[in-house]
Image (cartoon, helix red, strand yellow):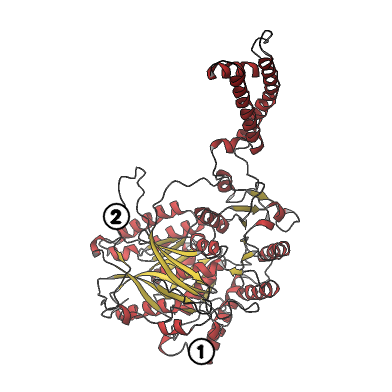
Amino acid sequence: MLGFVPPLPQQPGRPPSSGHMIVCGDDALGRRLAVELRFIYGERVTLLLPPGRDANNPETPLTQRGRAAALFGRMSAAMNRAGNGNGATGGSGDTNAGVEAVRIMEAPEPSDDVLEEAGIDRAAALALVYDDDERNIRAALTARRLNPRLRLVIRLYNRKLGQHLEELLDQAAAVAMPGIDPALLDASTTVLSDADTAAPALAATALTGSSKIIQAEGLLLRAAERPPPRPGEHADPGLCTLALLSSTTNDPAGAEGSDSSGDEAPQLLPDERAVADAAGRGTVVLEAISRADPARPATRMGGRGAPLAQIFSRRLRWSALGFALAALALVIASLLTTEDTALHSAYLTVLDLLGMNDPAEGASPARQIIQILSGIAGLLLLPLLIAAVLEAFGTLRTASSLRRPPRGLGGHVVLLGLGKIGTRVLVRLRELDIPVVVVEEDPEARGIPLARSLHVPTVIGDVTQEGVLEAAKIYRARALLALTSIDTTNLEAALYARSVKPDLRVALRLYDDEFATAVYRTLRTAHPQALTRSRSVSHLAAPAFAGAMMGRQVLGAVPVERKVMLFAALEVAGHPQLEGHTVEQAFRAGAWRVLAIDATPPADRNPDLAALPPFDPEGDTAPPPSGLVWDLHPGYVLRAQDRVVIAATRRGLAELLQRQRSAVPGR
């Protein structure tokens, strides 16, 4: 096991050998990705950081370089403790043996000279994970020109632009290298979004009994968290058990399990014996497989009523209904007291209401009384019409303004922050048809136009100020999602919300893992009856970016407490632990499990399993059937031409990829 990695001095020379990985970033994702590649996959990494402090955390005294070095040191020390403790990570599973320390460089921009100094011409892959989309695009174009064979992984928030950029860079690689293998070209450029990767997991933390969704070829893999069975009950294993939750999950003083939790930690991909012996533990099971709906027009995020409900207030609608009932009563009274037909009685009543009829001087007393009552009711019609006109004009004038939380709202989720992450989580929550109230301090935030166009109730104000959370109806909410970019703001909002509603479900976005653990323990101790979760976006997104750096399609990441389980698509060829083995033999507890096989002929396969089938607005064309076979016979022998969908731990996927590299010469 590699020893402690000290803070590294600036190293001006090029890397001594080729095949290394370059990571360029300016926030936590870049540092997390370097850790993932270095300590999980055992790759040589060059990390390019901007000089100075982290722009997203200016209050932190450490520079970007200092924070990265400290993170590498903590990771190396933690791995040494694990390796020297019980030997669980030693032996042939050591993915870090012989790996050089991470090389840290500082530069304000990834220019030609900087990339050449980092060894771009001999690198295997480059990750561009700056927070600025334009900087990533500019660097990607430069890198493709300097090394057409380079595998690119680009972080972009704009999904449509990402699709076009991916096609452009792959075309540039094909022009620069005529006759390139299409299989290699498929992995040449990958565009990912940390917001899209983390949003489903963040949204799921706010919901009781919610499912984690992974998409593959138009199908949904639904991983559901289930509580421990009661005495005398047997837990339903679903299609398969993906994980056993931590034994401290139900302990108020216990923390969420992580890699450092020992025997109390959650167990990913357990075998049948471990599941049978896990009394009192919750589980994460593969619950169901269903077809995903293709992309369709977004549903309205406002009320569900008729269009009139969007224009006129409820009070005005009730007033109009009362007036209509009064007019109907007058028509019935006229019909009963006179010998007129129903149509003529209604006609006379309308004239009376509008004050257009002649006085009923020679008529019966009943007719005269009805006419007087109709005149009185007609007096009420004028202010009703004026109110309707004023409300209609007011609605049109404020159509582009933010909607306020309606009266009587309850059972909703309060979402703090509408940045990149908050906006994606908002979309995810509305896709699940969950009512949301947004709190945002900046009226020009990225997600404000989306909230305005989709009529999501929004409160503009500083969440740390008194009265802001009350305006969001926090006392009637089901959960709080604190997703601002400032840890202290998220913590302060969570503490205040718990003081208002002690049993409120709370999920916080926190960067520092040790700080998150301390916060979790304190909140669980103070409010044992309420659920508390803390999540790091970079921790959730880094495994998907690392898998793309290795040239593999990671379909998604499912958080299991403070661990992460990956779903990936792999070709069986070149993986000795899979090829020639049955499905049952290929399963390795705690490492990987084969979930599905793509039965489509290799020439007809969709290279992107995560893509949805095209949407047919007419509904005439049925989506093509999926080639993925989920009901696998344990005795099926995996062949070299098969493509499989696996669930794997981070180390399990790293071991599979390392075995493939060692089995393919020159790779």
Residue 615 location, x and y as percent?
Answer: 36, 49
At 65% across and 72% down in the image, what residue appears?
62
Residue 549 seen in this snapshot: no
**What whole-number distance in Å separates the C-alpha atoms at marks 2 and 1?**
49 Å
The residue that mark 2 highlights is 624
Query: Quick one: 556 or 607, which is closer to the camera?
Result: 556
Task: Look at the picture and state if 138 lies above or below 531.
Answer: above
User: Viewed as shown, does residue 588 lie left or right of 434?
Assistant: left
| Category of crowding for the residue at label 1, using alpha-carbon neighbours closer than 10 angstroms: few (below 14), some (14–19), many (at least 20) | some
Q: Quadrant of residue 223?
A: bottom left
Element assignment for label 1:
helix
Q: Is residue 264 visible?
A: yes
The one of 81 and 614 positioned closer to us in this rendering? 614
Q: Position of residue 97 (x, y in %)?
A: 44, 86
Nearer the viewer's eye, disc 2 or disc 1?
A: 2
Image-based side of 97 in relation to 369, left or right: left
Amino acid type at circle 1 is: Gly
Rendering quarter of residue 247: bottom right
Amino acid type at image mark 2: Pro
Image location (x, y in percent) of residue 604: 25, 60
Which label belongs to residue 83?
1
Identify the residue shown where x is 35% and y is 54%.
613
Q: Residue furthest top?
A: 362
Binning the other alpha carbons within 10 Å of mark 2 as few (below 14), some (14 to 19) or many (20 upward) gives few
Mark number for residue 91?
A: none
Q: Which x, y percent locates residue 58? A: 67, 64
For marks 2 and 1 on the same chain, the one whose residue lies earlier in the sequence: 1
Classify residue 592 as left or right of residue 5: left
Q: Residue at the spot x=60%, y=54% of the render?
A: 418
Q: Quadrant of the C terminus?
A: bottom left
Q: Nearer the viewer, residue 228 or 291?
A: 228
Q: Secondary structure at mark 2?
A: loop
